[in-house]
Amino acid sequence: MRSLLVASMAFLSASCFSAGYLAQAARGQYTLLRSARPIGEVIRDEETPAPTRRLLEVVQTIKAYGKSRGLTPTKSYERYADLHRPAAAWIVQACAPLSFDVKRWSFPLVGSVPYLGFFDEAGARRYASSLFANGALDVDVRTASAYSTLGWFADPVLSTMLRKGDDALGALVDVVLHESVHATVYVKDQSAFNESLASFVADRLTSSWLSSTLGSDSPEARAWLAAQARDAAVVARLHRTYLELDALYRSDESAEAKLAEKKRILAAVGEELHLKRPLNNAQLAGYRAYNTGAAAFEQLFTACGEQWPQLLKATATLAESDFSRPQQEDFEEVIARLAREGCAGAARARKIASSL
C-alpha cells in the first residue's frame, strides 16, 4: 500500500490531470487490492460458488503455461477480488467527429494513452458528459472486465473476469494471458501496438492451451472458438467501416455532407450487427487499437520458428525510437522489420553458438 501511495504522489506531482481523477484512481486501486484474498483461501471457502471455484483452480496452471511460452512471471493472479459490480472499470474514449483524431491523455512512466479508466461508473459518465459538452467530440463509455498495472502491483483475478457458460474458461485463460503480455512487453506511447500484440499472443495461446489441456473437441474449446469467430466477424466489419469513414473524412465533401453520410453509414452498421449502443468514431478507434497488424505478427511468428519466447524477446527489443511517431496505428512495417532482422538475427546467433 505504501507503493500505491508513492505511485499516486508521482502522478499528482508530474501530471496535468486533476487531483480528483488521480485520487479516484488511487482510491479504487487501493479498495480493489484490499478486498483481494489468496486464491487458495477462496477455493477452500464453502461459500464460494462451484463455478467460481472451478475457474480459480486453473489460474496457476494458466500462469505456468504462459511462463513456459515466454511470458514474464509475476505475482499477479495469486489473489481473487469479488468486486460486486459488473465491471472492473469504466473506460472513457473520445475522438473528433470528422476524423480519427483521438483525444489522448498523458501520464508519467506510461506516456500517452487514448482512454481514461474510472472505478466509478457515475464518475466516468460525468466526465464523458463534460467532454461532449466542452468540445465537438464523439465520446464513448465502455466497460472493462480487467486491466493491467504493468507489474507495478500484484493484480488479482477479478470477479468481472469470470463469465458464465462454456466459453467462461477460454475467456479467463485469454484475459490472464493478455494482461500477462502487457507485463512482458510494453512500449511507451504505443497503445495500438501494445494492445494488438497482447490480443494476438493471448488469443492463439488460449486456443493452444484449451486444445492441449481439454482437447480440441471439448465443449470449452468449441465454445471459445465459436466466440472468437463471432468476434472476428464483428471486428472485420468495424474495420471496413473505419476505412470507409476515414476515406469519407479525407474527401472534399462539405462537413454537412460528411456528417449526413457518417450518420447513414453508422446507422446501417449498427442495425446489421445488432449493436446495443449507437456507434461513433470513439468506438471505432477503440476497436482498431486492439485489432491491428495480425498479418505482420503472423509473419514475425513464422520468422521466429513459431516459438513464442522468441517472438516475445524480439518485440521486447522495440523502443519508442523504433516508431515514427507516438501512438502510431500503422505499425506493420515495424513488425515486418523485426521479422526480417530480429528473429533472423537471433537464429543466426544460436546457430553460431551451437557450432562453437
Image (spheres, grey):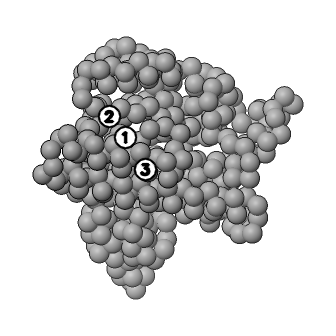
Please tell me which of labels 2 and 1 falls first in the chain. Answer: 2
The answer to whether mark 1 and mark 3 are in CB contact below 8 A is no
> Is residue 73 shown to the viewer in this render?
no
Q: Is residue 37 left or right of residue 278?
A: right
For the point 44% across and 23% down, the residue is 124
Q: Nearer the viewer, mark 2 or mark 3?
A: 3
Q: Nearer the viewer, residue 277 or 103?
A: 277
Sequence-first disc among 1 and 3: 3
Residue extending furthest toward the right: 46
Q: Which residue is mark 1?
A: 280
Q: Quadrant of the C terminus?
A: bottom left
User: Which residue is under mark 2?
Assistant: 138
- Between disc 2 and disc 3, whose residue precedes? 2
* Label 1 vs label 3, nearer the camera: 3
- The residue labelled by disc 3 is 268
- Identified at 49% across, 37% down, the residue is 277
Q: Is residue 14 left or right of residue 47?
A: left
- The kind of residue tagged 2 is Asp
Place of residue 209 in the rendered image (x, y in percent of width and height, measured from the top left) = 65, 62
